[in-house]
């Protein structure tokens, strides 16, 4: 064997060993991330939602809703309204939907029936 081939073989062995070690280190780091095993699993990411939004989502799901509307107070809260629309999908937000999600401080509109009250929110059925 020539020196060039020996050197090339040596470099190849070292690079393969390094790549193997990098892969092991990356897998070790990923396994330490608390949410890594659940990425893509149903319900992943819900733990970061504001508690009232999580409660709203669960209330809609419990009612087997296909659509809902938001009160002015909920719609004005960008964090609540945006997260609600994103996470509730495929449940749609529509202006004349029979289920009304409102902040617990909101009054129940005339003709509406309170279905559920929770942590910072409530769910009403309106005509």
Image (cartoon, grey):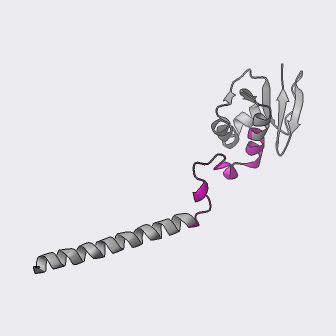
Task: Say if 26 sits above or below 37 in the image.
Answer: below
- Quarter of the image for the C terminus: give it: top right
In the image, 125: left or right of 82?
right
In this rendered view, identify the residue nearer to me: 45 or 12.
Answer: 12
Up the image or down, 112 lies above or below 102; here it is above
Position of the N terminus, as image quadrant, is bottom left
Question: Does the segment drawn in magenta span residue 38?
Answer: yes
Query: Picture coordinates of residue 78 (x, y %)?
Result: 66, 40
Q: Is residue 77 magenta?
A: no
In the image, the segment drawn in magenta is 32-57
Residue drawn at (67%, 28%) of the image: 92
Q: Residue at x 76, y 31 (%)?
A: 64
Measuring from the top left, give residue 123's x and y in whole percent. 83, 33
The structure residue drawn at horizontal position 68% and vertical position 38%, both measured from the top left corner, is 84
Is residue 2 or residue 40 the one in the foreground? 2
Q: Which image quadrant is residue 97 in?
A: top right
The image shows residue 27 at horizontal and vertical percentages of 49, 65
Q: Is residue 55 left or right of residue 7?
A: right
């Amino acid at each position: 064997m020539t020196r060039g081939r020996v050197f090339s073989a040596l470099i190849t062995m070292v690079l393969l060993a390094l790549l193997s070690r990098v892969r092991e280190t990356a897998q070790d780091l990923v396994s330490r991330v608390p949410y890594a095993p659940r990425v893509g699993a149903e319900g992943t990411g819900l733990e970061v939602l504001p508690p009232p939004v999580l409660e709203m989502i669960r209330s809609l799901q419990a009612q087997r809703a296909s659509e809902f509307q938001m009160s002015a107070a909920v719609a004005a809260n960008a964090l609540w309204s945006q997260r609600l629309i994103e996470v509730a999908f495929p449940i749609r937000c529509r202006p004349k939907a029979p289920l009304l999600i409102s902040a617990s401080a909101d009054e129940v509109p005339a003709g509406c029936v309170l279905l559920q009250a929770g942590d910072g929110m409530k769910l009403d059925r309106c005509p």
